[in-house]
Image (cartoon, rainbow, N blue to C red):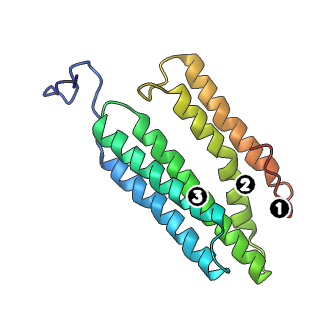
């Protein structure tokens, strides 16, 4: 049961259609970050299994985000999925930069901080996606506040993980 598009850019059900161009821009960015992460990892002795799996997940979530953005243009799920894919791409690249710095014995505090903050935010993207089901909208103030709290907690967890850059504790994530 597809919605009929009206002249005003709104579908038959009154929801405005989204432009799919953002989906096409975010997906290559996410995949590009993951691929650059794999290239950096290859320079540092080869990618680990987690880096390869991470890059594959970025590609799959990017494809899912494109499909949602193109097929269900009234829904907001595509941009949420793609934002999570970009964050995961950032994790892939930052992890590779951290490991290369360890191999070179130089240290890269910026990559360490970015990795920790991005890891802290990944569960918030998942929360956002789940709370926004079925159409990607946060229809009640409770949902909006819940998602905002999720992102806030993610930033706080990422910040707390940055207190000690020599040790990576993943249990808070």
Q: Mark 1 points at which residue?
A: 165
Identify the residue at image location x=78%, y=50%: 170
Q: Answer above or below: position of 28 versus 172.
A: below
Q: Distance between the residues labelled 2 and 3?
A: 15 Å
Instruction: Tell me whether the residue at label 2 lies in contact with that at label 1, contact meaning CB atoms closer than 8 angstroms.
Output: yes
* Earlier residue among tags 1 and 3: 3
Q: Mark 2 points at which residue?
A: 116
**Label 2, residues with CA under 10 Å away: few <14, some 14-19, many ≥20:** many
SS type, badge 2: helix
Res. 154 visible in picture: yes
Q: Picture coordinates of residue 31 (x, y %)? A: 46, 61
Q: Which residue is drawn at 49% across and 24% down?
A: 138
Task: Report crowding for label 1: few under 14, some 14 to 19, many 20 or more residues within 10 A (C-alpha).
Answer: some
CA distance separating discs 1 and 3: 22 Å
Q: Residue 54 carries which label?
A: 3
Give how far across and how far down residue 64 sits, in percent: 41, 45
Residue under the image location 75 percent in, 80 percent down? 103
Instruction: Give the distance between the C-alpha atoms of the residues marked 2 and 1, in whole angstroms.
Output: 9 Å
- Extreme residue in the front direction: 49
* Front-lying residue, 143 or 63: 63
Give the number of the disc on residue 5.
Answer: none
């Amino acid at each position: 049961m597809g919605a009929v598009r009206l002249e005003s850019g709104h579908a038959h059900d009154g929801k405005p259609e989204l432009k799919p161009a953002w989906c096409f821009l975010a997906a290559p960015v996410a995949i590009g970050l993951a691929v650059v992460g794999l290239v950096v990892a290859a320079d540092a002795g080869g990618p680990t299994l987690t880096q390869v799996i991470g890059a594959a997940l970025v590609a799959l979530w990017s494809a899912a985000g494109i499909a949602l953005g193109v097929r269900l243009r009234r829904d907001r799920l595509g941009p949420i999925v793609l934002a999570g894919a970009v964050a995961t791409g950032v994790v892939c690249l930052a992890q590779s930069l951290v490991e290369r710095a360890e191999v070179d014995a130089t240290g890269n505090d910026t990559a360490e901080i970015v990795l920790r903050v991005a890891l802290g935010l990944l569960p918030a993207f998942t929360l956002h996606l789940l709370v926004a089901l079925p159409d990607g909208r946060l229809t009640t103030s409770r949902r909006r506040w819940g998602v905002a709290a999720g992102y806030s907690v993610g930033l706080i967890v990422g910040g707390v993980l940055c207190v000690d850059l020599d040790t990576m504790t993943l249990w808070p994530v």
